Amino acid sequence: MTAFLIRRAALAIVTLFAVLTFVFVIVRILPGDPAQLILGDQASREAIEALHVRLGLDQPIALQYASFLGNALRGDWGVSMVTGQPVLAEVLSVLPWTIDLTLVSLALGIVIGVPLGVWAAVRRNRFVDYVVRIASLAGLSFPAFVSAVILLFLFAIEWRWFPVISARKGSLGAWTQSITLPAISLGLNSAAYITRVTRSAMLEVLSEDYVRTARAKGAPERIVVWRHALRNALIPIITVAGLYMSTLIGNSVLTEIVFSRPGLGKLIVGALSQRDYTMLQGMMVIYTLAVVVVNLLSDLAYGFVDPRVKLG
Amino acid sequence: MRKIFAAGLVVAALLTGNEAQAQKKTLVIGMGSADAGKLDPHIASTTPDKGLLQYIFNGLVRMKPGQISPDTIEPDLAESWTANPAGTEWTFHIRHGVQCHANYGEFTAEDAAYSIKRAANKATSSYSNDFSSVASADVVDQYTLKITLKNPVAGFLGYVANINGGNMVCKNAAEEMGDGFSKKPIGTGPFMFAEYQPQQYVRLVANKQYFRGAPMLDEIMYRYIPSDSSRDLAFQAGELDMIYGKQDQSWVDRTKQMPGVKVLAMEPGELSTLFLNITEKPLDDIRVREAIAYGVDRKAIVAFKGAGTSREAVSVVPSGYLGTDERAPLFPYDPVKAKALLKEAGYPDGLTVKTIHTTLTGMETFIEAIQAQLKKIGVTLDVQLVEHATYHSQIRKDLSPLVHYQAARFPIADVYLTQFYDSASIVGTPKAVTNFSHCNVADDEIRAARIETDPAKQKELWKTAQEKIIEAVCGVPVYEQLQLWAWKDNLDLGYDLKGSLNLAPPVTEKTHFLN
């Protein structure tokens, strides 16, 4: 177990280094000048060059890379070129919003998706199965920003149950009010995904010998399905949920925009359109870390749900 | 069962929240951007940032609230001012007893002089060019500031008005905070910076000591809501009192139908111009440029963009500016002549012109319409769409022979002419601003007008400059896009809104809700 963790940590460091270098190069290859964008279109070239000097962009690129890596190793991610705030502080100020939205919508996806998937698998090729399959296909192909606008229109305008600006905090009530619609919007999408994976994983397991054995020894269908079959179908479901969590973190930008919520998605899109190099670099590290951590967690979860999986 | 019922009640109470309020004292504004930029008035250059900062800062003078004409200039922090006959020495008498926000002390000539120097310094200001003629800003006494100019400057008062570099910052605060000033801007205006929540809002509170009297509102919530439809929905749901509109006609038509709402297309109009690089083939041939000018149908563009939100260009300078030739000899729409000119220039079968263009929605639909118009005279416009930051960088490297640019500037002809048509501003040069066409045909007139003290002669010089630029077809001005805003009609702005140079409606000490 310890050896496994050490190996994974080493791998994570290599991945991070590669991502850092890649991002550093890519953002500088992109056309567009952060100084120009900060100072606006009435600033003279002289003023823009003065800002280049202040931001260190006049230095040779190798030197910039060296100082960037050096600072990064010391845990200094620099300050945003646009706002002047430390990158880490900027990220931390919106991170809780992304984490709670991701977790709640994933939880919603699991709570809806797993039972539906199991149900559809058990009733394979019957009416229920068809309905679930079509619904989940629709859920997958429906863009989140369309469902978001529909949700807002119905629940915030017609019935006024929830606010349009879904960014309230401070009390449990305010939090619930703000997270419900965005989480439903994202959660329906992940539910559709998880339903489909659960269904196919269950179908495979239900045709295994030990399921037939369980049925033959007279175990009630409820026990067969939920204890014997589902437990064994969990591994692919966890894999997919884990992978999906990383995409949720990254893909929530449209949801954030439509529901006027802060979040990492908006931060990175803003940094990209402003060519905020330091911000982009810092954010990519955090994304990479998040993916690495989520993958590690799903690997650990395998060992937890399946004793046969040995980590080491 | 009773427990469930009780729990249900609690949830219901939590969900409905407590909205009941007496007199509404908080103004909630919905701005169309994802977040705040640099909240420093000498750097801010975007609509969202300028719109917000105007509530916090004053100038030495100001445009009357709701007006954009320099004719309406009135005292702000300076009670009165005088200038020598040559227009090179300006003395400003600062109002007594004005307090800087957050106990940074009284605003005096010291602060004013510091502000001018800060705005003139290219290390701390985006607007240093505007102050290149300032020789010195001296404190005569606590309440007297003297600005000496190297030469007279056309419409000098505009540069010390409440916009861009003219905004007055408090010296102690700016020096103490350094770079941090843009995170906690300190001014003298009716509202004070209170709180910033990233990607959500900036909250301002009333400055009870404001020199024109305590504001009637308690608070301004300036919310960042990038999605046009979410802003509309939140406005409709009553969560926002005033919104930045989606910049198109259909938005105006739709919003006007909402009950209890005022919609305004306000000044200034942003002029859309097609700049033609006169040094590059095939546009170096005047006949090709003339053909393009004849091939653009301004009327059709305005019909396409919407008559309530746009209007035809009148000159190479936007209409209504001091010095704009409102009846400039622009090329009329004449496709037959255009084709004849192309044939004469050696392009009987037409030609292709490249343009690098932004994907910004409003601008993109415009260039498509132009593309269709030019197609009719045999000019194929090769539109290469790139994202906005890329566009800004590439058009400054002469990569786009035709540049479509949309801009409003301080409403004096000199500013537009200098930035877009003076050869000193040619992109790629040290003083470069936005002369994309490499135009140099009116330098003499532009520069002479800048220091001319006789208003009639100055106007004549500007008129000649515009004629020369039009004749040389450095730019083909097409139409002007107005700024679209809507607000609830129970909000009394306290002044008559025609426009705002800071691009968002002013909120003054008199702005309040009627019920």
Image (cartoon, coloured by chain):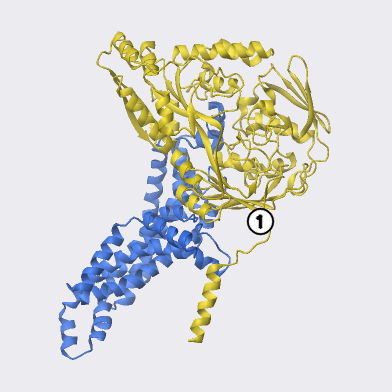
In the picture, measured across the screen, residue A249 lies left or right of residue B7, that is left
Foreground residue among A208 and B356: B356
Vertical arrangement, residue B427 with respect to residue B336, above or below: below
**SS under mark 1:** loop
Residue B472, position as x, y percentages in the image: 45, 12
Q: Say if residue A26 shows up in the picture.
A: yes
Compared with residue B88, is residue A6 higher up or lower down, i.e. above or below?
below
Amino acid type at circle 1 is Lys
Name above or below for residue A100 compared with residue B50: below
Q: Choose top left, top right, bottom left or bottom right for residue B39.
A: top right
Residue at numbered disc 1: B24
Q: In the rendered image, which quarter contains the C terminus of chain A?
A: bottom left
Which of these two is toward me, A264 or A63?
A264
Q: Residues within 10 Å of mark 1 (few under 14, many from 20)?
A: some
Q: Is residue B217 left or right of A203 when viewed as pictured? A: right
The residue closer to the viewer here, B331 or A98, is B331
- Chain letter for the blue colouring in the rendering: A
Q: Locate the N terminus of chain A and report the quarter of the image it occupies.
A: bottom left
Q: Is residue B511 left or right of residue B402?
A: right
For the point 35% across and 31% down, the residue is B368
Q: Between B196 and A51, which is closer to the camera in this rendering?
A: B196
Percent position (x, y) of residue B144? 82, 29
Q: What colour denotes chain B?
A: yellow
Q: Is residue A9 above or below residue B328?
A: below
The residue drawn where x is 54% and y is 38% is A55
Q: Is residue B499 left or right of residue A37?
A: right
**Residue A288 seen in this snapshot:** no
Q: From this viewpoint, which residue is outermost toward the bottom?
A: A218
